Image (spheres, grey):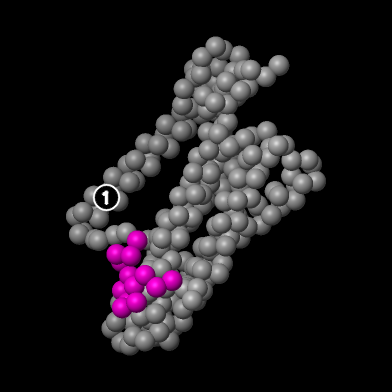
Amino acid sequence: MILSGPRRKLVLAIHLTVSIGWIGAVFAYVALGVAARNGTDLVTVRGAWVAMELIGWYVLLPLAIGSLLTGLVMALGTRWGLIRYYWVLISFALTALVTVVLLLHLPDVSATADTARDAEGATLAGLGGDLFHSLLGLMVLVLILVLNIYKPPGLTRYGWRKQAARP
Amino acid sequence: MYRSTMTEHGNPNDPTGAEHPGLPRWVKAMAIIVAVAVLLALAATLIAGIDHGPGRHGTGPSLGQAMPR
């Protein structure tokens, strides 16, 4: 089903809001991660981990799911389709991958935040900042953003057949 | 990249030819970059002996406990 003009614009507005918001939230998460990793003040380290847990569950995860769902609606509701163009297919696959990794990783963030709440001294200072996951995730999200802006050419075999069969 | 792809395979968004032109160059390049990155990450994990994966790199006693509770 192809979305009508106003509905398409509404879904696009929601999709852009949650997707760009997701990238912004990852930047905030990275800043907290840097503070947790480099912080000499133990209160800062503890506070950063608690905030990372909250951002993870209540900002990153909802925005990730929102981006995935609105992206799916945009793909299926427009002429682009989900599996007609390589850039759409790859963008969706990467978004789904990042969302699954986030979902699998958040319990570990909670566990570390729980440790940070009770730990003191060297244990607290040695918790690190979870920068590997957040920076890698940020790189993938920026790659998806670039794909969505440039829309590089290339029809999949399915898209090729569909377009060739069109009158 | 777009022009060279067009020269080799015709317009990749216009199926006027009978056969599918195959993967675009940018997809191949991306696949190679991702494969190299994954191999490097695997090598680094093996060399450093990092036990990485869901539930394997938490530090707290309540590992695996989810936030919404």
On screen, residue A103 above or below A47:
above
Left/right placement of residue B39 relative to residue B69 reads: left
In reply to whether residue B37 is colored magenta, the answer given is: no
In terms of depth relative to the viewer, which is nearer, B66 or A146? B66
In reply to whether residue B58 is colored magenta, the answer given is: yes
Q: Which residue is mark 1?
A: B42
Using the rendered image of the protein, determine whether residue A58 is visible from the camera's viewpoint. yes
In the rendered structure, which segment of residues is drawn in magenta? B54-66
On screen, residue B7 above or below A41:
above
Q: Residue at x 20, y 59 (%)?
A: B49
Q: Residue at x 70, y 37 (%)?
A: A1
Q: Position of residue B5 (x, y in %)?
A: 51, 23
Q: Position of residue A51 (x, y in %)?
A: 49, 76
In terms of depth relative to the viewer, which is nearer, A20 or A60? A60
Furthest-right residue in view? Answer: A6
- Secondary-structure class at tag 1: helix
Disc 1: CA contacts within 10 A as few (<14), some (14-19) or many (>=20): some
**Numbered-mark total:** 1
On screen, residue A128 above or below A166:
below
On screen, residue B42 above or below A167:
below
Q: Position of residue A44 (x, y in %)?
A: 44, 83
The residue under label 1 is which amino acid type?
Leu
Furthest-top residue in view? Answer: B18
Using the rendered image of the protein, determine whether residue A143 is visible from the camera's viewpoint. no
Tell me the quarter of the picture where residue B60 sits. bottom left
In terms of depth relative to the viewer, which is nearer, B45 or B54? B54
Q: Chain of mark 1?
A: B
Q: Residue at x 60, y 45 (%)?
A: A72
Q: Residue at x 48, y 46 (%)?
A: A94
- Would you say the magenta stretch is mainly helix, strand or loop? loop
